[in-house]
Image: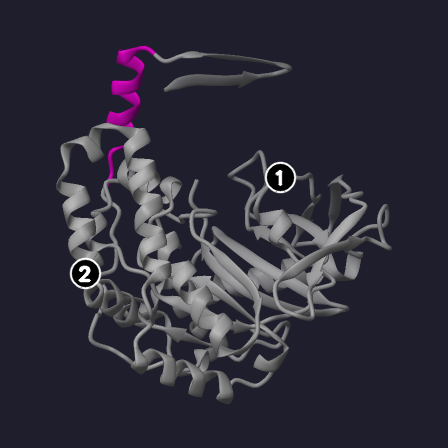
């Protein structure tokens, strides 16, 4: 562990002392309340059929979107989708004996103490989850749900919605896999297993361990949503980037095309500060990437030249619409501090995720 400190125009980084580590861990010790998963519910309902209270069946990501849809928003839409509840993950693990293999790993002192061994064993577990066949029950229900989902022929996003993410004290950002633009039951079923397996990504396991989340009480639900061929996408947080007491200005990060390159944090996005109060806009940076991500006609995504490189991603109209939409979402969830993933198709705004902002 290291101590990293940035002040003014300089920084220091050095190995942390045992006393500093102990003091930090004492301050950060807190109980993360993980929803107790309902493992009995075995249907695949559409998003507009459930609410935030159903978090114990579908996870917070899916449940929050259901809550937004129930509010009948006018400034934006939520792409339609459905959820594969915790039941099917638990069934998959139990049917193939993977629950027992997981329990054995967790009980092994070498697994607990040796980080390199832990990384290897988790990779093996993920592969076993991928290799095991999906149940006939899920195959039939998934095929039927896809047939009922308008727009599914154009590709769907398969996203994690576990009970250990998007929580008030633990958001799990970037820990779990999203599989974009999957077409047909076969591709979607494989993607579901990939999302299940990502529960045991090394970084996910380590972060949950630091948060003292019981791995045996961690379950994966999956959100299936119609893919939106975004012309711009990104993330908004309902706070000023340097002044947490400023409750009138929101921070927006944006890029052309699909938003996955914003979320992964590998390249500089367009960054704005936008006020919901007086619609003032401040530009912090512009994204000038020469390429962007788009849907591939055969499934998945591909990188193409960006014809709009050097141009603003967000017009003033789009930026203000985002700020107004985010303000509306804070009222829906009765929380002034939220994290929102959004996409535009032309001038039409879609919200694809809302969760509490974890500092």
Mark pair 1, 2: CA separation = 38 Å
| Quarter where residue 28 is shown | top left
Q: Identify the residue at image location x=48%, y=71%.
A: 188
Quick check: 141 left or right of 265? Answer: left
Q: Identify the residue at image location x=25%, y=60%.
A: 35
- Secondary element at tag 2: loop
Identify the residue under disc 2. Answer: 97
The residue segment tinted magenta is: 17-30
Point out the image quarter for the C terminus: top left
Precedes in sequence: disc 1 or disc 2: 2
Q: Identify the residue at image location x=35%, y=65%.
A: 221
Would you place residue 11 above or below residue 215 in this image?
above
Q: Percent x, y for residue 33?
A: 24, 51
Question: Is residue 19 inside the magenta stretch?
Answer: yes
Question: Is residue 244 inside the magenta stretch?
Answer: no
Q: Percent x, y for residue 241?
A: 59, 38
- Secondary element at tag 1: loop
Q: Percent x, y for residue 332?
A: 46, 67
Name the dominant secondary structure of the magenta segment: helix
Q: Nearer the viewer, residue 337 or 265?
A: 265
Q: Percent x, y for residue 240?
A: 59, 41
Point out the image quarter for the N terminus: top left
Would you place residue 112 above or below residue 163 in this image?
above
Can residue 167 be seen here? no
Of badges 1 and 2, nearer the viewer stands 2
Quick check: 199 left or right of 299? Answer: left
């Amino acid at each position: 562990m290291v101590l990293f400190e940035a002040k003014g125009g300089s920084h220091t980084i050095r190995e942390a002392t045992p006393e500093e580590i102990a003091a930090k861990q004492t301050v950060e010790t807190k109980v993360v309340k993980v929803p107790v998963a309902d493992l009995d519910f075995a249907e695949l309902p559409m998003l507009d059929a459930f609410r935030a209270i159903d978090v114990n069946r579908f996870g917070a990501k899916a449940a929050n979107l259901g809550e937004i849809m129930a509010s009948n928003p006018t400034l934006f839409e939520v792409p339609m989708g459905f959820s594969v509840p915790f039941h099917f993950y638990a069934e998959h693990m139990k049917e193939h004996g993977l629950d027992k293999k997981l329990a054995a790993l967790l009980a092994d002192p070498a697994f607990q103490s040796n980080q390199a061994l832990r990384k290897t064993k988790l990779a093996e577990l993920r592969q076993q989850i991928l290799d095991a066949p999906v149940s006939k029950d899920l195959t039939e229900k998934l095929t039927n749900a896809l047939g009922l989902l308008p727009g599914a022929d154009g590709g769907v996003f398969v996203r994690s919605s576990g009970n250990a993410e998007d929580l008030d004290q633990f958001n799990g950002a970037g820990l779990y896999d999203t599989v974009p633009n999957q077409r047909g039951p076969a591709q979607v079923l494989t993607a579901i297993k990939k999302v299940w397996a990502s529960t045991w990504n090394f970084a996910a396991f380590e972060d949950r361990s630091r948060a003292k989340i019981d791995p045996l009480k961690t379950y994966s639900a999956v959100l299936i949503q119609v893919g939106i061929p975004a012309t711009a996408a990104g993330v908004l947080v309902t706070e000023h980037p340097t002044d947490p007491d400023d409750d009138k200005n929101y921070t927006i990060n944006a890029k052309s095309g699909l938003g996955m390159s914003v979320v992964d944090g590998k390249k500089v996005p367009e960054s704005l500060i936008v006020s919901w109060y007086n619609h003032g806009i401040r530009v912090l940076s512009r994204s000038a990437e020469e390429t962007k991500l788009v849907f591939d006609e055969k499934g998945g995504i591909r990188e193409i030249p960006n014809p709009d490189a050097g141009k603003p991603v967000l017009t003033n109209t789009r930026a203000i619409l985002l700020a107004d939409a985010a303000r509306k979402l804070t009222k829906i969830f009765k929380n002034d501090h939220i994290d929102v993933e959004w996409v535009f198709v032309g001038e039409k705004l879609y919200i694809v995720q809302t969760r509490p902002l974890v500092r």
